[in-house]
Image: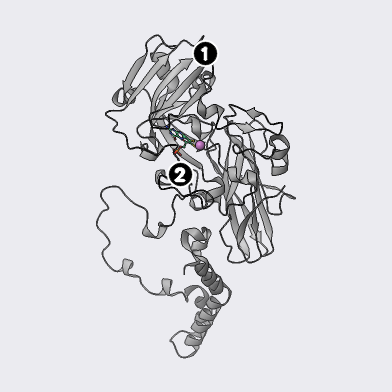
């Protein structure tokens, strides 16, 4: 068992027995092994004692002492075609939450945040949320229509759209229901399930405003746009024209340098930076310019916030500043006391992340983390901070602040405003308890 693998959640590499084995190896077994090497040297191996003493701890490992096959033979021929990850990474996968109904026609799969580096989600690990299943639509037959308050209503083919001036930008997408189960105090076990309805890609497409202008949009009257998806869910959402005029909203066909994945809306989806995932309409087939919000089913029945006074809050579309520590996080095991790089992700639907503070004592003391550049607007930001674990129980938290000065709330602060009966828009501080055994658990602090 390779101890280096412990950087990741056990569900990615190790089962319970695997964890026990590695922990035992770390505590006693490895020392025995080193002692064994000393004994062998003393028993007449041709090593001077002094060299054996210096070399044994580092060099006693057969994985460094003996030449592996891959250093001696001929490797595989070129991997033509579409490349795949190493077979040793096979457990890094999107998953359905154990806390939700497992469906054959899955409605949501979560991204393995605890296994990812940097800020970009590999396309094959991007979370999925389908209200009515996904489709692999023939792009030569896909059409995109613009109508409503425009002088020249028009239908575009994909080829016509892809001739227009395009841009590529990095943005996060987060489902409004991400971290939703935590409202009900359900401690789902891993960062994948607490925060994994979150992904980040480089999206390529045409600013929607460019297309609307081509169609002669009436910007005096046209204050809202209805976006409609082509799948059976009749996904329809209202997008304010102000957001579109900023040039940020894209009619996108590209994701991480290639065409969108079918699960993510191939061949066309709306990208609405900073706004909850549901507005990023997939299989986009129509936009209509209107003078008021459309109050569709997906913005009156769903994606509304039930407030403490019993009223529903509508059109709370922007994903407020939020963060989560991904290592160490629930389900992972710390092998031993000593140095760890605590790292995680921060984001804000209102712009750039300005600062992230990290606590290892449940919020009593905070230290400011390093932000990995470039820090981009409405994009994931990777943070990290040094930590020397003393082997005692610790509660690890992160608290992000965005460029508007907004500070991510704790549960007490969030519930004071939002009550307890919401499903959507939980951006509270996440707490991970590191037990003396090294096991990391999801706990909720007030
Ligand atoms: N046409 C269509 N668009 C859709 C959906 C859908 O079911 N159909 N789901 C929405 C929801 S609720 C979310 S969170 C995002 C998820 O995008 P992803 O599957 O690419 O992660 O797409 C949104 N756009
Ligand atoms: Mo969603």
Q: Is mark 2 within 8 Å of ligand 1?
A: no
Q: Residues within 10 Å of mark 1 (few under 14, many from 20)?
A: some
Whole-percent x and y of residue 295?
Answer: 53, 22
Q: Quadrant of residue 341?
A: bottom right
Q: CA distance from mark 1 to mark 2?
A: 37 Å
Q: In terms of secondary structure, where does tag 1 sit?
A: loop
What residue sits 68% from the left and 40% below the top?
420
Q: Which residue is mark 1?
A: 291
Q: Residue at x 60, y 62 (%)?
A: 439
Q: Position of residue 61 (x, y in %)?
A: 46, 74
Residue farthest bottom in this picture = 43
Question: Mark 2 or mark 1, which is nearer the start of the sequence?
Answer: 2
Look at the picture and state if 151 lies above or below 359.
Answer: above
Q: Residue at x 71, y 48 (%)?
A: 366
Residue 178 to residue 394: above or below: above
- Measured along the vertical axis of the image, is residue 169 above or below residue 105? above
Is 226 positioned to the left or the right of 341 in the image?
Answer: left
The answer to which quarter of the image holds residue 354 is top right
Left/right placement of residue 66 relative to residue 446 reads left
Coordinates of residue 135 in the picture (x, y in percent): 35, 37
Q: Nearer the viewer, mark 1 or mark 2?
A: 1
User: Disc 2 designates what residue?
Assistant: 121
Viewer-nearest residue: 164 or 319 = 319
């Amino acid at each position: 068992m390779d101890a280096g693998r412990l950087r990741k959640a056990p569900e990615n590499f190790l089962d319970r027995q695997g964890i026990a084995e590695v922990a035992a190896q770390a505590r006693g077994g490895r020392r025995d092994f080193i002692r064994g090497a000393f004994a062998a040297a003393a028993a007449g191996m041709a090593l001077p004692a002094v060299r054996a003493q210096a070399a044994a701890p580092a060099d006693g490992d057969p994985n460094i002492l003996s030449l592996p096959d891959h250093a001696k033979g001929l490797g595989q021929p070129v991997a033509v075609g579409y490349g795949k990850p190493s077979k040793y990474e096979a457990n890094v996968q999107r998953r359905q939450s154990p806390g939700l109904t497992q469906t054959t026609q899955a409605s949501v799969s979560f991204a393995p945040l605890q296994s990812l580096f940097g800020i970009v989600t590999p396309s094959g690990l991007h979370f999925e949320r389908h209200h009515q299943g996904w489709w692999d639509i023939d792009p030569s037959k896909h059409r995109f229509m613009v109508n409503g308050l425009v002088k020249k209503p028009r239908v575009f083919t994909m080829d016509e759209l892809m001739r227009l001036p395009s841009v590529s930008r990095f943005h996060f997408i987060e489902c409004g229901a991400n971290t939703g189960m935590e409202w009900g105090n359900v401690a789902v076990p891993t960062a994948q399930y607490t925060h994994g309805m979150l992904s980040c890609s480089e999206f390529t497409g045409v600013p929607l405003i460019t297309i609307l202008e081509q169609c002669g949009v009436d910007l005096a009257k046209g204050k809202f746009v209805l976006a409609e998806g082509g799948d059976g869910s009749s996904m329809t959402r209202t997008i304010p024209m102000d957001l579109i005029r900023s040039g940020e909203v894209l009619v996108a066909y590209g994701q991480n340098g290639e065409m969108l994945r079918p699960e993510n809306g191939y061949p066309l989806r709306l990208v609405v930076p900073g706004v909850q995932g549901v507005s990023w309409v997939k299989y986009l087939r129509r936009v209509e310019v209107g003078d008021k919000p459309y109050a569709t089913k997906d913005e009156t029945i769903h994606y509304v916030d039930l407030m403490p006074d019993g009223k529903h809050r509508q059109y709370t579309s922007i994903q407020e500043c939020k963060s989560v520590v991904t290592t160490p996080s629930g389900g992972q095991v710390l092998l031993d006391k000593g140095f760890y790089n605590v790292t995680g992700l921060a984001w804000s639907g209102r712009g750039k992340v300005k600062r992230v503070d990290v606590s290892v004592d449940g919020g009593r003391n905070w230290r400011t983390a390093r932000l990995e550049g470039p820090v981009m607007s409405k994009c994931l930001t990777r943070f990290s901070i040094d930590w020397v674990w003393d082997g005692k129980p610790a509660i690890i938290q992160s608290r992000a602040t965005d460029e508007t000065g907004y500070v991510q709330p704790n549960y007490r602060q969030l519930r004071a405003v939002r009550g307890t009966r919401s499903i959507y828009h939980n951006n509270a501080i996440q707490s991970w308890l590191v037990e003396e055994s090294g096991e990391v658990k999801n706990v909720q602090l007030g």
